[in-house]
Image (cartoon, rainbow, N blue to C red):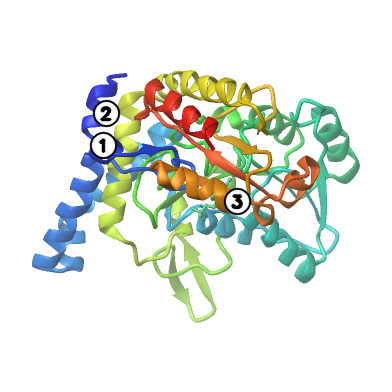
Amino acid sequence: MNIDQIRNETPNCRDKIFLNSAGASLMSKPVMNAIMEYLEEEETIGGYKLEEDRADQLDQLYLHAAEMLNCEPQNIAFANNATDAYSKALSSIPFEKDDVVILSDDDYVSNYMHFITLRKRHKILIRRIRNLDNGDLDLEHFQKLVQTHRPKLVSVSHVPTSSGIIQNVNAIGKICADNEITYLVDACQSIGQMPIDCQAIQCDFLSATGRKFLRGPRGTGLLYVSDRILFEGNTPLYVDLGGAEWTDVHSYQAIKSARRFEFWERPCALIRGLSEALRYANNLGLERVQKYNQTLTEQLRRNLSELKDVTVFDRGSKLSNICTWKKEGKSLKATKDHLDKNDVFYSIVDRNSALIDFDKKKVDWVVRFSPHYFNTKNEINQAVEIVQNL
Ligand SMILES: Cc1ncc(COP(=O)(O)O)c(C=O)c1O
């Protein structure tokens, strides 16, 4: 990893300590250039003509995404964000009364809200996988849940928004595949910070966002859809003329590829940006990205937890680039003011985003630092020193 080159291509990382790639990361120059160049051309000849002229270039999105996720371009749909991708996937599953879905305690807040709606509308039942003492998912418990309930769906967030754990999505996927259970993975926080292999995970759907560790623009996301789901004919609840052909007054024919999960109108300039972000990350190599990032985050966690009155909350046998912490005796306002004054960029995660996890940890809010490969060890040391002076 050529960190100097990466930092030169991320010019705005130098005047601050940017530790918020789990929120919305800094875009690289190639990503910005691709968006601006496309918008300028749109301004000149109009969006429809340009989309026609640039069809091949826009289609590169599917190639780069397929390379990143180890699948074929036909398994990829563009989405406006991760929630858009997730909810469209969910809406293609014909839930009925008493259908069981299995979730984890650390799944994303909006995903949970979707299931609350499904519970109200379709009277589905929600079961949750227990955690082991170290924070990992209890796979034996999961096996038992599967055998007892024969669930319609299993869904897990690969990396939660509110803690550093990396869930064992491959082990969950194997059990789902052995039992022919539909499996939906939320990879919103993992994409761009580690390799993701949809064949190894054996998922049916995988949702992701563009703006976080992938370093794409806001307003972009991806949905992976497996061959099985495409073959079985699942379509989102509301398909539009981009995803299907109106063949008869009372019927339509969905297109073959995952693009049946897209709507016709697309933000083409942002698609160019997302495509560049995927290409950029693929070129760096996700194994290398993860390896470098691990050195940063291990240093961060170790040094923060050595500070007086600081608690680091991340638990699990495998940890990601998300580091959550809090300093005892310091209010939310005092913490924010101090970090802001010192040009540290971060997020606060509050209890409403992680109800189950935070009630177990007995916290109302935590600070989330999320370094990425454009950060340096020196910046991590500076950030720790700033927390020490809080
Ligand atoms: C784990 C996880 N899933 C899903 C989402 C939702 O992503 P988006 O805001 O792109 O819809 C987030 C956002 O923070 C997240 O952290």
Nearest-to-viewer mark from 2 and 3: 3
The numbered dot on residue 6 is: 2
Q: Earlier in the sequence, mark 2 or mark 3?
A: 2
Label 1 CB sits under 8 Å from any ligand 1 atom? no
Q: Nearer the viewer, residue 157 or 19?
A: 19
Q: Residue at x 21, y 40 (%)?
A: 30
Amino acid beneath label 3: Leu
Q: Give residue 181's position: percent from left, percent from top.
A: 73, 42
In front of the other: label 1 or label 3? 3
Find numbered disc 1 in the image and state the secondary structure of the residue it sits on.
loop
Secondary structure at numbered mark 2: helix
Q: Position of residue 376 (x, y in %)?
A: 37, 24
Local packing at callout 2 (Cα closer than 10 Å; few below 14, some 14-19, many 20+) is some
Q: How many marks?
A: 3
Residue 208 appears in view:
no
Assess mark 2: CB under 8 A from ligand 1? no
Density class for disc 3 (Cα within 10 Å; few <14, some 14-19, many ≥20) is some
Q: Residue at x 34, y 38 (%)?
A: 278
Inter-mark Cα distance, 1 to 2: 6 Å
Residue 164 vertical placement versus 97 (above, below): above
Q: Are marks 1 and 2 in contact (CB under 8 Å)?
A: yes
- Give the residue pinned by disc 1: 10
Q: Which residue is mark 3?
A: 332
Q: Residue at x 63, y 44 (%)?
A: 330
Are the residues at dot 1 and dot 3 in contact (C-beta closer than 8 Å)? no
The location of residue 253, given as percent across then percent down, is 48, 65
Name the quadrant of the C terminus: top right
Q: Quadrant of the N terminus?
A: top left
Horizontally, residue 41 falls left or right of residue 387, namely: left
Q: Are there few (<14), some (14-19), or many (20+) residues within 10 Å of tag 1?
A: some
Q: Residue furthest bottom?
A: 249
Q: Is residue 227 left or right of residue 130?
A: left
